[in-house]
Amino acid sequence: MTHKTKYTVIGAGHGGKAMAGHLALMGFPTTLYNRTESHIAAIKELGRIDVDSNDGSIKGSARLEKVTSNIAEALEHAKMIMIVIPSSAHREIAAACAPYLKDGQIVVLHPGRTCGAIEFAKILRDNKCKADVTVSEAETFIYASRSDGPAQSRIFRIKEAVPLAALPASRTRLVLDHIHEAYPQYIDGINVLQTGLNNMGAIFHPALVILNTGRIENTHGDYQFYIDGVTPSVARVLEALDRERVTVASSVGIRARTALEWLKLAYDSTGDDLYEAIQNQEGYYGIKAPPTLKHRYLFEDIPMSLVPIASLGQRFGVSVNAMDSIIRLACIIHRTDYWRRGRTVDALGLNQMSVEELLNYVMVGELDGFSAAS
């Protein structure tokens, strides 16, 4: 009898519940962890998550092996550890996991945003984790889902192809071999710089909020975020940010997709410029703006997506004036210092690396006496 891989899903938000429920329905022994006990109380009492999908292809009561707020208990028997929490909490969960991780376990960040796996691995080292663990990240989250209730999940869509990379990239095939048992949709993402610098949310989300600040506060988000919020002038700012991102990627040896290429690939949406391509994307119609400026498009996407891209640019001599402008405006609006709180090259331990050393680190993993994998 073949024993299926044991999964632990960390995070019981919309995404975590969808992933845990779907894994359990597929027959994988699944543990669900959430730091706050009250958020999983109903699931723990029932022992299950009721899962449904829009097309009816996924439906049933998903029996979980364990539901817990004890991190040691959650990690004890897991082979695959799926981190499905906001990237702003990756540092905290890495520190919490460090004492309990074991040789051979695989961590996947869903998604890593930008430099997520690099940050996670550094926090494990800083916390003296000696286990031979493989840290990896997905470029984007595989599910579009919502919670219909405390123990219910509705899955709208599962993406057909999601790039994934391990740190170091020499271990990506190991991760794919394990995760393909449940998710054949994951493909080789080349390396974690490639997945992180193809983070389109860094370009679209913060700037669209910042440039529509008055509208969001006046209407509480009662307008179409992409269709009404992206005017020709706003699109020109997005294009400037995108040029900077692609140039930063090039400076570290990465060929990143442009926003226009991404819209064509993801949605088959085209146009002579970014404004036209966004307006031609039918899936954007009906998507409302955030109801408040206290939203993850700023407090997560600025420090965990835009800051690391801009910081890499500054380290390797790329002008990132447009990115810096958006970051500084967010700092003013939220009365916080996102440069200090974000994933800068200093915070990530990359500040002394040359491009060659950085690429060697993400591809092979060995540098100055430590390994990316442990």
Image (tube, helix red, strand yellow):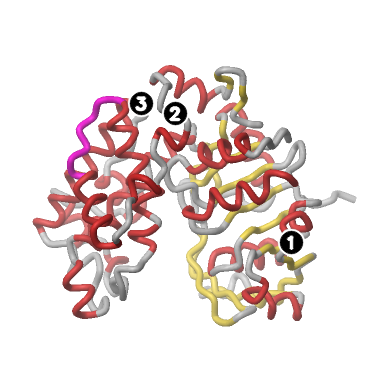
Amino acid type at image mark 2: Leu
Range of residues picked out in magenta: 316-322
Q: What is the residue that sits farthest to the right in this orientation?
A: 1
Residue pointed to by mark 2 = 350
First in sequence: mark 3 vs mark 1: 1
Q: Position of residue 139 (x, y in %)?
A: 46, 46
Q: What residue type is labelled 3?
A: Val
Magenta residues: mostly which secondary structure? loop
Q: Is residue 6 magenta?
A: no
Question: Where is mark 3, residue-wise?
Answer: 252
209 or 126: nearer the eye? Answer: 126
C-alpha separation, residue under disc 1 versus residue under disc 2 = 33 Å
**Residue type for callout 1:** Asn
Q: Which residue is drawn at 45% across and 23% down?
A: 359
**Label 1: which secondary element:** loop
Residue nearest the viewer, comparing 86 with 98: 98
C-alpha distance separating marks 3 and 1 = 40 Å
Residue 352 is situated, as x and y percent measured from the top left of the image, at 42, 22
Residue depth check, mark 2 versus mark 3: number of the one nearer the observer: 2
